[in-house]
Amino acid sequence: MATIRATIEAPAPPEACFNHVADFTTTEAWDPGIRMARRLDDGPLGLGSRFEVISIIGPLNVPLVYEITTYEPSTRVVLTTRGRTHLGVDDVRFEPTADGGTHVTWAAEFRLRGPGRLVDPLLGAGFRRVARAAVAGLRDALRGLAHAS
């Protein structure tokens, strides 16, 4: 199993940060490990909303479907991907700061299932490297939200 926990101090308010992260189509813009992201359903964003992302894993383009499994506007969103060979959970929390910004905590876990679990111990280092790049991209994107308003 691979895990990462990261914090971001963003100058944008919690509502703006939450809305940007909960709309997982934005990952294509800020996560260099994502080739494409699109919404799979219509209607208001919320519990049960689904997204397909194409993750770049080495030379492979791997499609993953994420679903919002917890949706607490402006405070917490959890996105889960589950397939025959994997299970991943991204738990993102948003806390207002005294200066009107947001303290964002991202906890992610990804594990292989089935025969892939034999290489699961090797997954950690690569996952952390990719996740660090994603966190840096998200940090920049959330900072950009403050400048856009």
Image: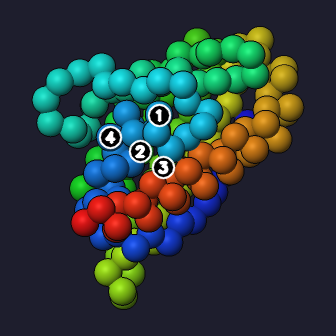
Q: Give the mark, 2 or 1, whose residue is nearer the N terminus.
A: 1
Label 2 packing within 10 angstroms: few (<14), some (14-19), many (20+): many
Q: Are marks 2 and 3 in contact (CB under 8 Å)?
A: yes
- Disc ID at residue 23: 4
- Disc ID at residue 28: 1
- The residue that label 2 is drawn on is 78
Number of marks: 4
Distance between mark 3 and mark 4 Cα atoms: 14 Å
Distance between mark 4 and mark 1 Cα atoms: 11 Å
Three-letter code for the amino acid on which mark 2 is drawn: Val
Q: Give the mark, 2 or 3, whose residue is nearer the N terminus.
A: 2
Q: Which corner quadrant of the image does residue 70 belong to?
A: top left
Q: Give the mark, 3 or 4, whose residue is nearer the N terminus.
A: 4
Three-letter code for the amino acid on which mark 1 is drawn: Glu
Residue name at image x 44 percent, y 64 percent: 143
Residue name at image x 53 percent, y 66 percent: 8
Relative to residue 144, is residue 88 drawn left or right? right
Q: Give the mark, 3 or 1, whose residue is nearer the N terminus.
A: 1
- Disc ID at residue 91: 3
